[in-house]
Every structure is written in C-alpha cells, then in structure tokens.
Image (cartoon, coloured by chain):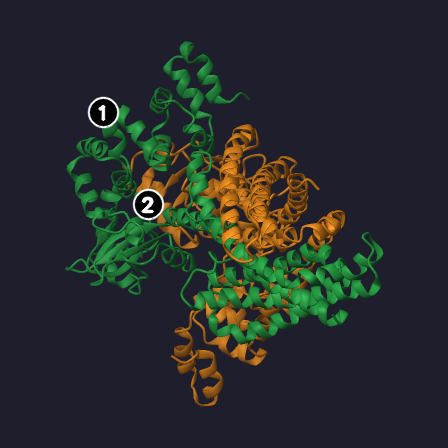
Chain colours: A orange, B green
Amino acid sequence: MTDPIEYYREYRSILDNSQVRELFSEISFDQLIGEWRGLSEEEAADIFLHLSPEVKLDLITELEPDDQEKVIRRLSAKGKRTLFQSMEPDDLVDIVQSVSQEVRRTVWESLDDESKKETLFLLRFDEDDAAGLMTPRYLAIRSDITIGHALAFIRENSAKVELLSDIFVLDELQRLEGVVTVKDILSSGDNLRVSEIMNGKVISVLDSTDQEEVARTLETHDLVSIPVVDQENILLGVITFDDVMDVIREEQTEDVYKMGGMSGEAEAYMTSTIWRLVKKRVPWLIILLLVGTITTNVLQHYESLILGAAFLFIFMPVITQTGGNSGSQSSTLMIRGLATGEIEFRHIWHILMRELFVGLLMGVITGTVILARSFFLPPGIFLYEAFVVGISLALVVFIANLIGTLAPLLIHRLGFDPTVMSAPLMATVIDVAGLTIYFETAKLLLGL
Amino acid sequence: MTDPIEYYREYRSILDNSQVRELFSEISFDQLIGEWRGLSEEEAADIFLHLSPEVKLDLITELEPDDQEKVIRRLSAKGKRTLFQSMEPDDLVDIVQSVSQEVRRTVWESLDDESKKETLFLLRFDEDDAAGLMTPRYLAIRSDITIGHALAFIRENSAKVELLSDIFVLDELQRLEGVVTVKDILSSGDNLRVSEIMNGKVISVLDSTDQEEVARTLETHDLVSIPVVDQENILLGVITFDDVMDVIREEQTEDVYKMGGMSGEAEAYMTSTIWRLVKKRVPWLIILLLVGTITTNVLQHYESLILGAAFLFIFMPVITQTGGNSGSQSSTLMIRGLATGEIEFRHIWHILMRELFVGLLMGVITGTVILARSFFLPPGIFLYEAFVVGISLALVVFIANLIGTLAPLLIHRLGFDPTVMSAPLMATVIDVAGLTIYFETAKLLLGL
C-alpha cells in the first residue's frame, strides 16, 4: 500500500475533502505522529481539518508544544471551540501550560464558562504530581440517599464523565466518605441506602503524591480509577486507569534511557531535533569519559609489567568486558527489584550471602572457559599464562558481581535513583577495579 | 515498627487467631510476597489462614508453583472451595496448569460445575496468547431488545462479572456485532433499541493475538476491556485492563533484564534459588566472553605498536568504554523507538542522516575533552600524543554511534528482537571496531 502522506502530497490538487478524509481514516496513529514534524504548516493544518474528531483530540494532546501551536493558530474560532470543549480537562490544562501567551489567549476565548472554571481549578496544582493526572469531572452522591435515587441521579448525569464506574460518596463538607461502583448500585435493590452498600475504606491518593506511586497504588488494587484528595480529605478529582497506563509507559522509557546512559526524559525520537539529541546524550558521555580516564592513571602503574608479559595486554579488554557484564547483570537485578519494591535495603545480608555463591560459581565457570579458549585456540598462549588469565578473570567476575550488587543498594539507601548510576557508570568503576585485580593477580602469580 | 513476620515468630504461642489476623492486615503485599519463601510450611499455612479473602486470592495467584502447592495441600476441603470458587477463571486456569497432578485433582474436586466448565473451556487455549488473559465471564445482549430490557438484564446479572463496563452485542450465532457501555445504556431512554445506540465498530483481538499486541491495542484506544474472538468472530471471552497492566509490567522487567545481558524471563529475585540465578546469567556471560575474545586476536596485531608508543596502552580502556557508551545510547534510542512503534525500518535513511550529525558533534566534543584532560592532567602526555588520542576518540565515537544506530534496525528487520542483542553484545562489537580504529588512526598519525 502507498504511504497516505506521499499519496496526499502527490494528488492533493485533485482530491476533494471527502477523499482526503477517507485517505487519513486509514493511517495508523503512530505513523501520523511520526511523520507530523515532516509536514509543512499548510499541510499540517489541512490534514488536521480532515481527521476524525477522536483522532484530532488524540493528536493534539500528543504533539510537541511548537507543533500544537502551529495547528491551533490555523484553526477557525469554531474549530477551536469544537476541539477544546470536547477535550478532557486534564489534557486541556497541559495544552494551556505548554503553548505561548498569544495562543493561550485564543484557546481561552474558545472555552465555555464551565471549562474555564475547571481549567483554572486544575492550574492550581503541580502538573508532575497526582493532581496533574486528575480530572475534576466525576459523579458524587450523599450516603443517605436510596439506591433508586442514586440510580436516577447517575442516569441523568452519566454523560458528563469520561468513564462511568466509581461513584464517590461525600459528606456535607465535600470530604470523601466512601465509594460505590455502578455495578454495586445496579445489583442492589432500589430501597436500600447508599450507606448500606458503600465501601467506607476508600483507597485514595493526595494531590501531592508522586505519579509513579499513584500508578503502583492503582495497579496493586486493580482499580479503574482512584480519587485524589487534599490534606483535609476533600475530594479534588479522579485519576482514571488510562492516564496511569501512560505514566507506566513513560516511566518505562525513562528507565530504559537511564540504563542506556542518557538523561531519562522521555521524548519522541523522530520529532526531536539533532541538537536536543546531543544535549540529552553528551553530558553523560563526558561525565563517564572523565571518570573513565581514571583507568589511564591505573594503567600507568603497569606499563612496565606489560613489557615483560605481553599476553596480559591482549587479554585486557575481554577481562574488563566480562567483569562489566557480570556487574551489570547483578545491578540490573537489584535495580529492578528495588523498583518493584521486592528488594529492600534490610535484605542486604541475605542478598550478599547469595551473591557470594553466585559470583563464585560464575567466576569458576567463566575462568575455566577462558582458560580452555586461550590455550587451545589462537592466540594460543602457554598453559601457565592461560592459568593466570583464568584465575584473574574468576576473581574479576566475583568482585564485579559484588560491586554490581552492593552499589545499587547503597545508592538507593542514600536516597538517589540507582537507575541513573547504572550500567555505564558501573562499567567504569568495574573497569578500574578489574584492571587492578587483573594486574595484581598476574604479578603475584608470575612472581614479578 | 517491628516486622510483622518476626513479631509473629516470636509471639505466635501467645497470640489468638484474631490477633494474628490483625497483625497481617497491616503488612504490605509486596513484603508478604518477598518473605513468603522464607517461611516454613507450617508458618505459611498458618499465616495464609489468617489473611483476608482478597489478600488470599492475590497471594495464591502470585506465588511460585511450588509455594502454591504447599499452601493448597494444607487447606481444608472447605478452605479450597471458598478460595477457588471466588477466583477469577483465568487465574484458576493458571493454577490448574502449574501445580502437580495430585494437587490439581484436589483443586478440581473443590470446584462447582459452572467453574469446571469455564476452566475446561479456557484450558483449550494457549496461555501465552490473548486467550490466556481472557475471562469467560461477560455480559452479552441482543441488538433488538430495548434499553429498559437491557438494563433489567444487567441489574439481574451484574454480580457475575468482575468489571461492569462494556456489554457486548451478539447475533444469534454468538458472533460479536457491537458493544454498548453501561454508561451509554444509563444515559439513554428506556424505549430506544440497543441497535440504535450500540457501537458497531468494535475493537477486538483474536484468541491467537500476542499479549503485547493486546496491551498496545487496549492502550491506544483507552479501553477498559477488549473482547477476544475466534476466526469466525465468535466471542470467546474478555480481557480487562488490569490483566493488561500486568503484561506491561512483565514486559518491562523482561526488557530491562535483556538490556542487562540476561535471559529475559521475569522471575522474583528473592524467591529464586542460587542455581536458577546462575542459569539465568551464565549462558550470556559465556557467549559474550567468547565473542569478546576476538579482541585478543585484534590486539595481537598491535603488540609491537605498543612497545613503540606506550601511551596508546594506557588510553585503551577509556577509548573503548566511551565508544561503547555512545553506541549503547544510540542503540537504546532505536530499541525503544522500535518497541513503541515510533521508529520503523523505512525511516532508516532519515535516521542515518541525523545520526551522522549527532555522532560528528559528539565525537568532536568528546575528542576535545579528552585532548584537554590528557594534556593538562596526569598522566600528562605530550601534545602530539594528546592529539592522536583525541582524534582517535572522535572517530571511535562517530563509528560506535553508527553501529549502535544501525545494528538494532537491521536486527529488527531480520525479524529478531533487538533488545536481546543489545547493550552487552553491542559493547563487544564496538570494542573490536573501536580498537582497530584506535590503533590504525594512531599508526597513521604517528607515521608508524
């Protein structure tokens, strides 16, 4: 099949509006996002007009701020009204916060009073906390009304909410007292009171709760939505599972970036500029480079050793690399365990005991492998040299495994994020330790 | 606060049952899971008895098969009946599939006819596909009934389903015709027909769809649940968002493990045995070690070069390390982009052009940094030597960046998972390329 965007460019002049609509109803959302930045402002504006209302909403919330601005600037007053009034309040706030003053004003003018009120309310909160995910549109009832009454209320008002599942029970001061699901209401008799069927142990989060903690709470309890309250337990809004899924994905990307040695901010690759990519990568590269040059000082000590035993030189990279791999395996296990909450600092002795054995076994196995490999295959060194290499590697793997185990636990204990300090920095630390162990073991065994 | 498990061990003899219940109502679920394997069979059985029904259900589904067996074996006939009959059919099937023949029979005998039928139905499907996530409990109606009639049906049957949100519309052959949400039904007049308000464009997945694709489909469309159909569009079951969240988390752990150079199977660290940990790690360690020994053959060529220019030796680790870091940054960006669907193979030329510039910039910057560092700080080499090191590093970073960019794209194109081949293997490939570039550049610049 041809690329809809190429086809559009080639034949726009002979396509009527319904044909353009048809064309872009087929395109995948990921492709649309991926190619958006390559479009001229005219093309972007024209294509946007012919997307379905749902895709318009999804797209505008996903675009980078400057692309959002370009689209919004070209919309008619009516187009803006339709777009922004059907938008979820939390998404609307994100746009209001990211666009320029000028565009912000035109967005504002297109809102009705209700949306303006909701937006102003949400703007009071920090966008990185639980409050940044919540919508102020929810259904709330009193505990003393009957199920029949509640049901009538829900039928009248359900169109107002995004997701109809949890109905919150508030007291006269708007404090969160309980929750009932629509399922509970539908399966109860009309004459019961809400108080008789409501769950009074509501799981809620504070407006200042970290987004990742919100995600974990919702997941642990398999909730469709989670209420956000303030210090006085007054209900501020509701976070739905779909926003939590976005948080999980974002967190996932950030962790992967950090493990790859980059600043962790998740940003679309295809729409990022070259300069932003360099800025994301080069600071870490320089830090690691400067830390890594410590190895030059270590190696200076062993220059003369190399002149006497050249085989040590040729095995250097494979020794440090294998040490690094063993260390990054154990640090990965620790980091993941810490992230999921399975591992805690107080387990440190138990973990250490296990990893002593794991490291010993892995050291003996890899040491034996390299001994055999280097004796039987080219470069084919002498047997006593192969023993030196094998024993050093076993020690390096053992020590690297311990460093990889302990470092994340200690970093986490000190209150830092172990993922940031992970794989690449670990590799440098292990390089320094590994080279020292390697050469010292060799010196000892060779009697130099 | 004291550890509930320690407290339990210390004082079990003087605690009555309600006090034990009280004690374990406070414990976090993660801690319970984390410490479970450390409990004796008696302790595990006793504590399990005193957990709340919800925690019992969550715990038994999360435990490793042999721990599940231990608990189940000690339950009374009544305890089994209560536990398994309140369990979701998909979780029940997982247990039936993982326990031993003997325990399986006792589980089976505790089920009522309805549960047996559901379980037998689910056992027909592969547990790794969409079908492995679905529950056969859903509400389905015909399109020609009225809303009033539909509502009465829902009120009567809603207790049967886990999550009340989507009601499926089936034709007389059980084929999926449409979907209505409870919200749509509640906000419509009683005399309308279901066909007038239903959404006829249902998003569904096949029973053989991959679990990760199910996750992506549900996420893209912000669905609470997604129906599973067979080739004939007959409705088999429903997957709810909470099961999809588990898939996303599992996928996340597996990706992180693969990046850390381990077999990707997600398994709890604390409950794993030492031998299982070694088995998970050592195969990759040996493969990477053997591939890595190629560097010994490369370095053999340059032994004599080192004797003439010893400064090349001491900068070797920092050069390969920095090359490796730059390569793992770009491969991480590619792997992540491929995983989210943002990057596709057909973007290869566009990406290549960008990365040529990114690599060039990063090469020049890091080259300049190391030039200054090695000239001004110890070991304080000569300026011409610093130039050799700087220029080589710039080239290594540039080439490593390209390898890190292209390798995942090509691996993905060939139909393999680029995450598996990621960071550690990349490091080895880049080591070989980096060392060759380094020494060849040095030879050229030094006129050797």
Q: Which residue type carries mark 1?
A: Lys
For label 2, the SS is: loop
Q: Chain of mark 2?
A: B
Q: x and y percent of residue B304 in the render?
A: 69, 62
**Which residue is pictured at 22% across the width and 25% down the height?**
B78
x 43%, y 71%: residue: A52
- Note whether residue B343 is visible: no
**Nearer the N terminus, badge 1 or badge 2?**
1
Give residue A159's position: percent from left, percent from top. Answer: 40, 55
Q: Which corner quadrant holds the C terminus of chain B?
A: bottom right
Q: Nearer the viewer, residue A446 or A45?
A: A446
Give x and y (percent) for residue B439. 68, 65
Do the residues at pointers 1 and 2 share their chain? yes
Q: Secondary structure at mark 1?
A: helix
- Would you call the spot at circle 2 few (<14 residues within 10 Å), some (14-19), or many (20 or more)? many
Q: Chain of mark 1?
A: B
Q: Which residue is mark 2?
A: B163
- Decide which of B137, B178 is in the foreground and name it: B137
